[in-house]
Amino acid sequence: MSLDPEEEYFLQDIPAMYQTSTPRNEVIGRFLSPVIDDDALPLSDVLTASVVAPSLQVFWMGMVHAPSPTWLPNTMWLERGALVFPTLLHGSGLACCWIAGALAAKAYTKEAIDPTVEGYPTVIWTILKAGAFATGILIFATQLDLLAEFGRYVQPGESEATDLRLLSAVVEILNDVVFEASTITAFRLLLAVSTERNTPSLF
C-alpha cells in the first residue's frame, strides 16, 4: 500500500515532534539529565548540607542552651556521642532538599559556579532560587511528618499540645533554613571567588 506525500511527510516528522523541547520536558530534564560542569560539586554540597550545617546548628544550641529539637535525643548532653547519628540522619534529609533545589535551579552549570561567565548576580540568584525550592520541600516534608505523627491534619488552637508541637516545628524549620542557607551560601561564594582567582578550591 502506497502513501501519499502528505502521509509520508507526517510519518517522517513524528520523531521530531517527540524531540521538541517543551517547558514540561525541560523541567523534568533538570532532574533526570542535569548539566553538571563540576563533577565534585554535588558531593561537596552534600557534605556541606548534611554535616557542616547541622553540626554548626547543634554546636550553637549547646552554646546558648537552647531546647533540643525533636530530631535530637533529650539526653544528648549527658551521653557521649548521642548526637552524632541523629545529626547525620537529619542532615541527610536537608541535603536531599538542597540537591533537589540545586537541580531545579541549574546550580551545577558553569554560569552558576564561575562568576567570570555571567557575574556574581547570576551566582547569587541561582543560590536563592535553589534555596527557595529546597525550603518548599522542607516545609512540605515537615507537614507530612506532622500528618504521620498526629494521623490527621492539625491546626493551631486545637490544644496546648498541638500548638506546642506546631510551634516547635516552625522553630526547627527556621533554624534549618538559617544554618543551611548561611553555610551553603558561604561555601558557594567561596567557591566562586576561588574559581575567579583560578586557585584550587578549599572543598
Image: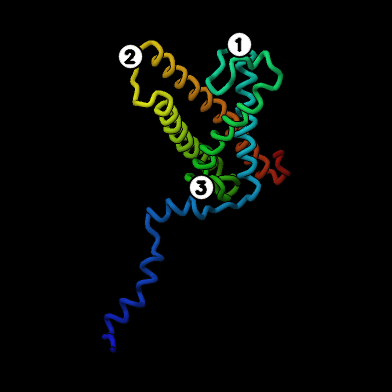
Q: Which residue is mark 1?
A: 65
Disc 2 residue crowd, few under 14, some 14–19, many 20+, Cα 10 Å: few
Helix, strand or loop at disc 3?
loop
Q: Quadrant of residue 183?
A: top right
At x 43% / y 52%, what residue is drawn? Answer: 28
Residue 199 picture location, percent across and down: 72, 44
Q: Earlier in the sequence, mark 3 or mark 2?
A: 3
Rendered residue at 43%/25% (across/down): 149
Q: Amino acid under label 2?
A: Gly
Position of residue 55 measured from the top left corner of the image (x, y, whole percent) = 64, 26
Give the amino acid at mark 3: Lys
State left or right for residue 156 relative to residue 171. Answer: left
Tag 1: residue type? Answer: His
In the displayed structure, 2 sits above or below 88; it is below
Asked if the residue under mark 1 is in contact with the one under mark 2, i.e. CB atoms within 8 Å, the reply is: no
Q: Secondary structure at mark 2?
A: loop
The residue beneath circle 2 is: 157
Q: Residue at x 32, y 15 (%)?
A: 158
Inter-mark Cα distance, 3 to 2 = 41 Å
| Mark 2 vs 1, N-terminal side | 1
Which residue is identified by label 3?
106
Circle 1 crowding by C-alpha within 10 Å: few under 14, some 14–19, many from 20: few
Q: Quadrant of the N terminus?
A: bottom left
